[in-house]
Image (cartoon, rainbow, N blue to C red):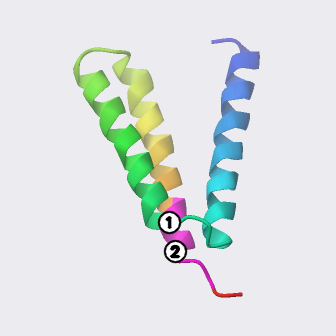
Amino acid sequence: MTREHAAAGQAALMLVESLMLALVERGTIPAMELIEAVETVIDTKRRLAAEGHEPKVAGQAVAMLTTIANSLAAAGPARPR
């Protein structure tokens, strides 16, 4: 992977996490719904790794996705304004 691809991946991941947190903080989407969506992706990555599809990369992706799920869980329910 080139540095440009790595930078694009990092920027995309940070942007998505930021948008998810903003949606939770504004009460647009409950944190649990987003956590469930992230957990679905985690399950998919684990299944693909078990089938031999880039297991090392999948493991790294699972770690990153788990961090996002934990971040959303920490954001918790939306606060009333």
Q: Relative to residue 1, is residue 58 drawn left or right?
A: left
Q: Nearer the viewer, residue 11 or 40?
A: 40
21 above or below 78? above
**Split into 4 quadrants, where in the image is the C terminus?**
bottom right
Q: Kindly identify which residue carries mark 2.
A: 76
Local secondary structure at mark 1:
helix
Q: Estimate how packed mark 1 is, as few (under 14), some (14 to 19) or many (20 or more) residues with alpha carbons within 10 Å.
A: many
Q: Relative to residue 36, is residue 13 drawn left or right?
A: right
Q: Relative to residue 3, is residue 71 drawn left or right?
A: left
Q: Earlier in the sequence, mark 2 or mark 1?
A: 1
Seen at 40% across and 27% down, the residue is 58
73 above or below 61? below
Seen at 57% across and 71% down, the residue is 75
Residue 3 in picture, x, y percent from top left:
74, 17
Q: Kindly identify which residue carries mark 1.
A: 31
Q: Alpha-carbon distance for marks 2 and 1?
A: 6 Å
Amino acid type assigned to the residue bearing label 1 in the image: Ala
Residue 1 in picture, x, y percent from top left:
63, 12
Residue 11 in picture, x, y percent from top left:
73, 36
Local secondary structure at mark 2:
loop
27 above or below 57? below
In contact (CB < 8 Å): disc 2 and disc 1: yes
Please provide the residue range marked out in magenta: 71-79
